[in-house]
Amino acid sequence: MQKRYFIHTFGCQMNEHDSARMGESLARAGWSAADVAESADLVLLNTCAIREKAEDKLYSALGRYRMVKASRGARIGVAGCVAQQEKEQLLRRAPFVDFVLGPDQIARVADLAEQGGIETGWVPSEEYVFPQADPETSRGRATAFVIAMKGCDNVCSFCVVPHTRGREVSRPYSEIVREIASLTAVGVREVTLIGQNVNSYAGGCGFAGLIRRVAAVPGVLRIRFTTSHPMDLSPELIDCFRDVPQLMPHFHLPVQHGADSVLERMRRRYTVAQYEERVARLFAASPRVALTSDVICGFPGETEEEHTQTLRLLQRIPYDNLFSFIFSERPHTAAALRLEKERSGAEHEPAWLEVPRPVATRRLDEVQKLQQARTLSRHRASVGGEVEVLVESARTSPGVPGERFGRSRENWTVHFAGVERSVVDATQHRAPPRIPRTRLSVVSA
Ligand code: SAM
Ligand code: SF4
Ligand code: F3S
């Protein structure tokens, strides 16, 4: 009987992408996908290390999957960022794990599933080959992630990604364009170019050049990208928002903080004024762009005044939405090393004092409440208006007959009863000549 695998994916789009490629590698080696872990012969966890909570989720999931191993002898593998970070320590903490696989080694998943072991080496940048997506995985889907670059050459002092994903490597644009052509051939209409720092792309052209080349692929109706660093927001990329019709008016541009002093400790390489100046240029070129951002509360040494500067920034910039987090100390990062010195008494500087948890929680709450109110009032203004929706699924939820789900151009999720004929169902692979519009009646913050 064919052996079956189950992949549990945590974290960002990079991990979702890597899980899809690992599934394809396993399929080529004769495995088939299981619907649930309980019927699998291999349970693979693709993990995230961005915050402590993400890592905790791995260990609680491992506790559950251990039972699957006990009951049916399934093999257990750990891939992704915690695998890269912990390496053999992971086997010490969870000795029932059969193999550990770093992000550069995903092509070896089938071998490791058979042999067991630890494979977390880096492939030298010049030798790295990006796994090509099998278009069959996307048949019947309207959207797909396409990897443009991997790794991150920035050194933000809070962030573990450079340690878990290594140096930046850009994928040649010819490979990207070829992959996208193979995806549109099976019905994909929206592609999201992904990378930890995607707008620093340099795979034979700049990122703006890549967007223009992708827009020229027949069948591409929508282009998105994530995630961008403010320092790599070029005038050429801003121009694309004005004159590439397929580029969707949504931009995720994490600011992280509203005080220059904190941005400096975070090693973000820009000031608040520089960020706002770039945002102003973006809005001048494309006034309707939905801007979203990330903010960290409770970064070491954050004073009440610095926190207030974040609140003021959120009042100035018309963000469409915001992802906000409490600072989490991550291994090997510059902030963690600095905090260790502080704790050992080797150095002392008020600018690096830990923010007590209740204070950080209260500040996060203030940030979230402020942005929720602003997001809600923006979205309320759209009630009764029409938005263009690319239908991603025709799932029928209990009590909502014919409910469909899709995204607007701004990346709002839209649920609606889509029984009318004009709504194109991407799962039936009918290529829409024009994406349908639906009326907004329900708004959620
Ligand atoms: N590459 C992106 C960038 O530069 O903005 C994002 C990387 S990360 C996957 C997504 C977000 O997680 C970051 O923008 C940051 O707000 C947050 N984050 C990263 N490290 C964190 C930490 N140690 N504690 C809390 N939040 C963190
Ligand atoms: Fe992390 Fe900074 Fe790189 Fe983003 S740019 S992945 S926050 S190091
Ligand atoms: Fe998490 Fe790694 Fe992505 S740390 S956010 S899975 S790059």
Image (cartoon, rainbow, N blue to C red):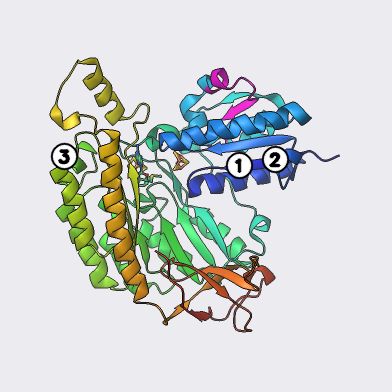
Which residue type does callout 2 highlight? Ala
Q: Are marks 1 and 2 in contact (CB under 8 Å)?
A: yes
- Distance from the alpha carbon under mark 1 to that under mark 2: 9 Å
Image point (30%, 56%), residue name: 369
| Placement of 209 over or under 4, stated as above or below | below
* Residue 386 in view here: yes
Q: Which residues are magenta?
A: 90-105
SS category of the residue bearing label 3 = loop
Q: Is mark 2 within 8 Å of ligand 3?
A: no
Q: In this rendering, would 105 be left or right of 255?
A: right
The quarter in which the N terminus is drawn is top right
| Placement of 277 over or under 342, stated as above or below | below
Q: Residue 363: x, y in percent? A: 26, 45
Q: Residue 37: x, y in percent? A: 70, 40
| Placement of 277 over or under 283, stated as above or below | above
Q: Residues within 10 Å of mark 2 (few under 14, many from 20)?
A: many
Is 99 a magenta residue? yes
Q: Residues within 10 Å of mark 3 (few under 14, many from 20)?
A: some
Tag shown at residue 37: 2
Is 283 a magenta residue? no
Which of the two discs, 1 and 3, sits closer to the camera? 3
Q: In this rendering, would 144 be left or right of 152?
A: right
* Residue 271 in view here: no
Answer with mark 2 or mark 3, whichever residue precedes in sequence.
2
Look at mark 1 in the image and give the residue it sits on.
8
Image point (47%, 48%), residue name: 171
Q: Residue 248: x, y in percent? A: 41, 69
**Ligand 3's quadrant:** top left
Which residue type does callout 1 highlight? His
Image point (27%, 44%), residue name: 362
Look at mark 3 in the image and give the residue it sits on.
303
- Distance from the alpha carbon under mark 1 to that under mark 3: 39 Å
